Amino acid sequence: MARILITSAIPYINGIKHLGNLVGSQLPADLYARYKRARGDEVLFLCATDEHGTPAELAAAKAGKPVEAYCAEMWEVQDKLGRGFRLSFDHFGRSSSAQNHKLTQHFAGRLAEAGLIEEVVEKQVYSVADGRFLPDRYIEGTCPNCGYDKARGDQCENCTKQLDPTDLIEPRSAISGSTELEVRETKHLYLRQSAMRDQLRDWINSKTDWPILTTSIAKKWLDDGDGLQDRGITRDLDWGIPVKKGEDDWPGMEGKVFYVWFDAPIEYIACAAEWVEAGKGADWERWWRTDKGAEDVRYVQFMGKDNVPFHTLSFPATILGSGEPWKLVDYIKSFNYLNYDGGQFSTSQGRGVFMDQALEILPSDYWRWWLLSHAPETSDAEFTWDGFQQDVNKDLADVLGNFVSRITKFCRSKFGEVVPEGGSYGPQETALIGDLETRLRRYEAHMDAVDIRKAAAELRAIWVAGNEYLQSAAPWTVFKEDTERAAAITRFALNLVPFYAGLSAPFIPDAAAAMAEAMGVELAWPESAEAALSALPGGHAFIVPEVMFAKIADEAREDWATRFAGTRG
């Protein structure tokens, strides 16, 4: 039994995430966690909300709530939606936790002792009216490039041009709208990533099995231009983890907090401590400290490509720079973007399908299957309503759902709601067992390698093989001439249902559970195709399940395409 530590990139707290966010980290991480548990491995699957930084303060202000109350409320929303999508986290934590405060301050202290933190005086925009320094996103104005009048101080959302606050025409505070802005000096802490460049390069080069997407992004940040740059790890904000050197105050850093990109990855570790405090587990250090049992842990991270630099460089620099025996990631599965119907998902414009809306119109299995079978692994993928309707109707309704419905209803009509006795498997069944054994091992290999689209394609092929067998063997015809042979065919096909349930559970857990329940068995991963396809003996009772997957009608597809075209209520 292997020990597998799995983390998903933690979603930001400012609002409900869209399907592109979901398939870029949490959903594939859940697929892998479910698979590894099914294979008997010991799994710890952690995620949390990312609660600090400018967007959290802005979102709270917009909602008219104190930021701490806003974050608590949104954590509840995101936790509920995660459960709605059947995300099987062992713990869903919060980066604002006491555990993360303590660990973040601890790492900062260790890095300072190692000479890897530098104090830097820099110039920043100060709002006289608000009485505070303004991070780039707190400054709005007109874009000098396209004339958009709500450009932010870091980037224009309209034309995507990168900006500095001083580039903006008629800049104003995003908090108060005041134009009374000044440039003042402020002191911040910088993580000296450049001093660790060679160590990070050697570590990344040792990861020969990583996806090209992951390593190419990491190496670009390491070597392009002037190479890896030092990075500010503090901000002039009210909401966040106060800057401390371990448990000690940090002279000159009063009133400042750690930058969200410093504390957010540390929450992966803190989340395990939260898991223990919540009474769900024991001894979190055996997962995270190589001197306390984590030397045999395989740590796998899942994230969108925009998060790769922080997880391949900044977070490892923090871990390595601490000089302590923390567990480093073994494998980083990164994803490209899922685009929406000829454009992009847009949280601000409400364009696309968001997690709450998705669950309002269809059960989670529909979304899980489509998103995972189209995971943007090697290139960007695109969600279209036509494609979604076509794939769901074909794969889930016509292939899997239809197979289960046909064989259980046929058996009920001819033999009752029990697996029929009589007859024996022949060459047709033997050949299919051999084919399914090959496909089972291929499916497992794809899942082990986290090749999600290949795994989905193999699972689909396994479903198709059962349909083709049923159509070819035609027990409804054979029954008229040879009831013993019809009984054997029916028994074999019924045994495919729990076989499919076990294999399908990582992708479509609700449907898999329904299949297993209908057949009166526990969900289990098959040891072999041969054993699985004779597991249900003659006389074993079952029930005909409800329709597992209703087809998506053209009218519904057209309605949804209009509804999610660009305005979120």
Image: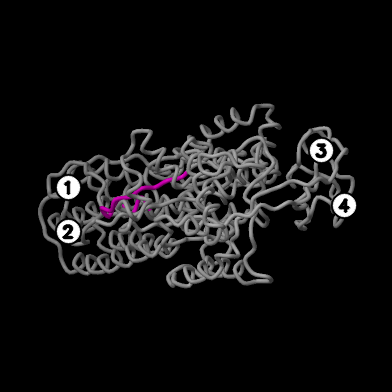
- Helix or strand or loop: what does disc 1 sit on? loop
Label 2 or label 1, whichever lies nearer to me, is 2
- Residue 110 in view in this figure: yes
Is 205 located above or below residue 9 in the figure? below
Task: Locate residue 141 relative to residue 306 in the image: left or right.
Answer: right
Give the mark, 4 or 1, whose residue is nearer the N terminus. Answer: 4
Q: Which residues are magenta?
A: 33-47
Label 2, label 1: how many angstroms apart (C-alpha)? 16 Å
Q: Are marks 4 and 1 in contact (CB under 8 Å)?
A: no
Measured as percent of width and height from the top left, residue 495 is found at 22, 53
Label 4 or label 3, whichever lies nearer to me, is 3
Q: Which residue is mark 1?
A: 419
Q: Which residue is mark 4?
A: 147
Give the mark, 2 or 3, whose residue is nearer the N terminus. Answer: 3
Give the mark, 4 or 3, whose residue is nearer the N terminus. Answer: 3
Q: Point out the image quarter for the C terminus.
A: top right
User: Residue type at mark 3?
Assistant: Ser
Question: Does 322 appear in magenta?
Answer: no
Task: Locate residue 281 relative to residue 537 in the image: left or right.
Answer: right
Q: Which residue is mark 2?
A: 531
Residue at horizontal 54 percent and vertical 39 percent from the top:
248
User: Residue type at mark 4?
Assistant: Gly
- Helix or strand or loop: what does disc 3 sit on? strand
Q: Which residue is mark 3?
A: 127
Give the mark, 2 or 1, whose residue is nearer the N terminus. Answer: 1
Measured as percent of width and height from the top left, residue 150 is found at 81, 45
User: Residue type at mark 2?
Assistant: Ala
Label 4, label 2: how many angstroms apart (C-alpha)? 68 Å
Query: Depth check: 143 or 259 in front?
Result: 259
- Helix or strand or loop: what does disc 2 sit on? helix
